[in-house]
Image (spheres, coloured by chain):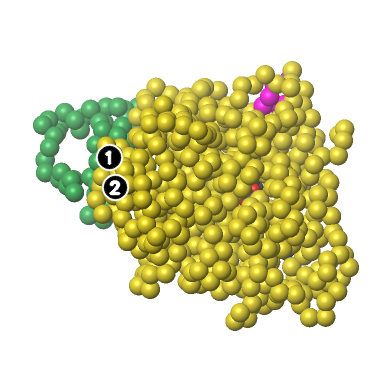
Amino acid sequence: MSSQRIYEQPLYPYQRNRDQDRKSPNRHPVVIVGAGPVGLTAAIDLALQGIHCVVVDDNDSVSWGSRAICFAKRSLEIMERLGCGERLLQKGVTWNLGKVLFDQRLIYQFNLLPEAHHKYPAFINIQQYWVECYLVERCQELSEWIELRGRNQVQRLEQFNDHVLLRLKTPDGEYTLEADWVIACDGANSTVRDQLKQDFVGRIFEDNFLIADVVMDAEFPTERRFWFNPPFNRGQSALLHKQPDNVWRIDLQLGWEIDKEQEKQPERVIPRLQAMLGDEINFELEWVSIYTFRCCRMEKFRHGRILFAGDSAHQVSPFGARGANSGMQDVDNLCWKLKLVLDQQAPESLLDSYDNERIQAAEENIQHSSRSTDFITPKSEISRIFRDAVLNLAEHQPFARPLVNSGRLSQPCSYLNSPINTDDVDDDLPSGVCPGSPLRDAPTGDGWLCEQAGGSFQLLCFDQADKEIHSETRKVEHLSLNTKKDSSGELAQRYLGKQKEGYYLIRPDQHIAARWTKYDPAMIHQALQRASGQTASVQWRN
Amino acid sequence: MEKLNLNPNLYSADDFYSELLAIHESRSKEESDTINARLILILANHIGDHDVLKQALQLASETTS
Ligand SMILES: Cc1cc2nc3c(=O)[nH]c(=O)nc-3n(C[C@H](O)[C@H](O)[C@H](O)COP(=O)(O)OP(=O)(O)OC[C@H]3O[C@@H](n4cnc5c(N)ncnc54)[C@H](O)[C@@H]3O)c2cc1C
């Protein structure tokens, strides 16, 4: 290996901090445990809203090896808001085509067909370590607000009425600090979760996957290839996917009864990969690992002043790319609520809507990824018979293709039943952007909607007739959009349908809270109250 | 909700039954299982209606009746 890889370098090396020299613990508004993709995203989101936070991580570098590689459009839109979107898009590999092979036959291919006229594609592939690296750099740009503390490991944690006490271990010994709020982003083996003695229940899948990232100059096209029962991995599945820098992700199912240590050895791995890629291909191993997985979640994501996000709160199988993508959406949902609570502009109970909305999302993700797993690795003879029947039929019969499940790729959750939505009064506006849905990007004539929306509550006024802004609604930033400026016609199509004007109240996370076909300050005010958790009668539905 | 039709609906029941057996003739158990699976998938797609399919799944799984 030529030079040191990015994940072998300490990007935020340990430095002694002033809290270590204090006699009594210092109090911070927010402490984030874990500087993975989720914790770093949370820190940037809070910083941009003017909240100081401390991020502690037991390590000082980015993810060892690439792990997550597929980042979805919704994550990129969140990254846009946080100032990293374009950088990721430039570095990432954009792909749309997926091929499914059964034995040696191509039985089906799909195009993710991203609807035209969105700033970001359906997916990009990029190594998790690059994502984390860009996020770390963004945190460092925001160092006025974010303190990133490497090699600070949370050892113990105790919750009190109005704060949380954390005990940290560093190369210089231990110290304590206090936080008004803690966001636990400390991954699947969360220490914080253990400290609270919370269960992490769900299904464990009895299977092992060999994951290898290889560097090669191959002429394979930029597409996702998924094999069921290929000749080079009989009875199992395989995946090939391209990443930047000529790195390719190979995923080989190995089955349950294997010797993990032995399977990881290059002398076992290289022949397997050679059989898959063909004898003439030269490659170099970048990273090899064996993983098993489970689909589970905590029962509640909010425990008083401690909020769980990302893998600490829920875990899914990698089929569908729902891990990091959903974790980023967790904190996208959480941070603006925490900001309102810290500023005393919303009751603490607003944070229960985080729990409500993101548990719904986790359930969706777990269901999708469990179903993909059941298709990919049939658990009984009869399920294998059905699976193979689907694959055989799919080759010639279009009807069977929707049943082929090699991973249903991550889609954002629409919080359709969220108690902080305001229901439509009529059904005049397009259903694709109903209350609870995430913003649907569109060209605005001078850029993209996803660039202009979000970060605070906003009222998007499409072709507003009445130019006057009433004083009660001044709290909400008004964004005036003229659909005639968009020559594609999509802005009008997506937000107005047949209507002449439309008003959308959107939350800081770009989800739609309420909408109307008339400008009515009293309704806007009420919906804003509701979206910020101030309606006393809010019932938490599940 | 569309109701699963449980009234006699096959015009030539005996013909259908013998044709059903015929496609399994001299097949191994494994081949027959595959044929049955394909048949279920083909018919399910033809029916399409999810409510009807759910009632059929329910009825089929009540193996004692
Ligand atoms: C093979 C594989 C492929 C995947 N592919 C995808 C994909 O394509 N798309 C996708 O979205 N997801 C994918 N995932 C999932 C994705 O990697 C995870 O969901 C994601 O890393 C979760 O991020 P996180 O920030 O919650 O946790 P982590 O990334 O696990 O970060 C947790 C951090 O907390 C730190 N920490 C832990 N304990 C402590 C402590 N006590 N004190 C201080 N710090 C602590 C750790 O050092 C770490 O930095 C994949 C996963 C695997 C294994």
Q: Pick whichever, A378 or A165, lies toward us.
A: A165
- Residue A275 is covered by the magenta coloring: yes
Is the C-beta separation of discs 1 and 2 under 8 Å?
yes
Residue A209 appears at what percent x and percent y? 64, 43
- Residue A414 is a magenta residue: no
The residue under label 1 is A499
Secondary element at image label 2 = loop
Alpha carbon separation for disc pair 1 and 2: 7 Å
Q: Position of residue A126 (x, y in %)?
A: 66, 37
Whether residue A435 sits left or right of residue A294 in the image: it is left
Relative to residue A101, is residue A218 drawn left or right? right
Q: Is residue A300 visible?
A: no
Residue A517, labelled with which disc? 2
Camera-nearest residue between A89 and B18 = A89
Residues A59 and A106: in front is A59
Of callouts 1 and 2, the N-terminal one: 1
Residue span colored magenta: A274-279
Q: Answer above or below: position of A369 versus A212.
A: below
Give the chain ID for the green colour.
B
Q: Residue at x 68, y 33 (%)?
A: A91
Q: Which chain is yellow?
A: A
Q: Residue at the spot x=32%, y=51% of the render?
A: A519
What residue appears at the point 24 percent right and 36 percent down from the top-left corner?
A: B47
